[in-house]
Image (cartoon, helix red, strand yellow):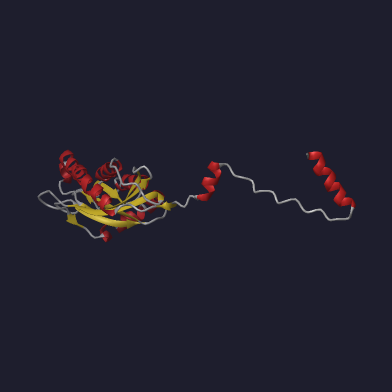
Amino acid sequence: MHEAHLLIALSLCACGTQATEPPPRAPEQKPASRAKRDAVPDIKGEIGALDAAAVTAVFEGAMKKVEACQDDRRKRDDRLDFLSGEVAVEVRVTEAGAAREVTLTKSTLGDRVVERCIVSALKAASWPRPQGGREGIAKNGFSLPMKGDREAVPWEAVKVSSELAKAKGALHACTKGGPTELTMYVGVDGKVLSAGASGVDAAADCLASEASKLKFSSPGGRPAKVTATVD
């Protein structure tokens, strides 16, 4: 049968009849797994959505641990009986629902021990998984009210500006030039009883450490609390 087809084709060519072009080749079939992958592109972005109600529930569930951070610190050091302040946090949540990073975007607590305790409590929580992205961002703010008998004397930032200016080099090295809030409790002898800061842990730790070396004028018969911007 093959030989007969070949002879007919040769005969047509010899008579001057143009041979028809062979039919086009069928497109190459992709492997099933590859075809499926190409048909459904990965459209997941970097930042996905978090269920607002679920995020609120996680924050509310963590508040007992957060309040315990404050209470434990007051019990361990009665000089900080007045410890209190405002906090704002940002949590970066992975696809698995775990906290990859917790940052205090604001803190006027004035104590790194409590601040780090809060970060640990939020990192240990189980978060909702982000939808449509590889990572989700949860934000919240809360207050830890003063529980002692008397609050610290409130100081304006100008009270500490000259000493902070003298230490600008060391403080700047901590923040890398970005503005950060530094809160301190200044004892009656002018020494820093405790300090805390907003920002990532490493920078905040560095700021609190450098602030603890400073000495200011005496606030009088009660410790003072002051919040200043460091840049």
Q: Position of residue 160 (x, y in %)?
A: 28, 56
Q: Where does residue 89 sit, x and y in percent of width and height?
A: 29, 51
Viewer-side residue, 132 vs 158: 132
Viewer-side residue, 70 vs 131: 131
For the question of whether residue 26 can be seen, the reply is: yes
Q: From the top left corner, tell me how far across and down residue 154 is, in percent.
A: 19, 57
Q: Could you say which is closer to the camera, residue 77 or residue 102?
A: 102
Question: Does the image show residue 106?
Answer: no
In the rendered image, which quarter is residue 201 located in?
Answer: top left
Which of 72/25 is in front?
A: 25
User: Which residue is rendered at x = 83% and y = 46% of the image?
Assistant: 8
In the picture, the quarter occupied by the N terminus is: top right
Q: Position of residue 177 (x, y in %)?
A: 41, 55
Image label count: 0
Corner quadrant of residue 159: bottom left
Query: What residue is shown at x 59% (from left), y 44% (from top)?
Result: 30
In this picture, residue 213 sits left or right of residue 85: right
Is 173 on the left or on the right of 111, as rendered?
A: right
Q: State which quarter of the image contains the C terminus.
A: bottom left
Residue at 38% x, 52% y is 48
Q: Is residue 155 above or below residue 208?
A: below
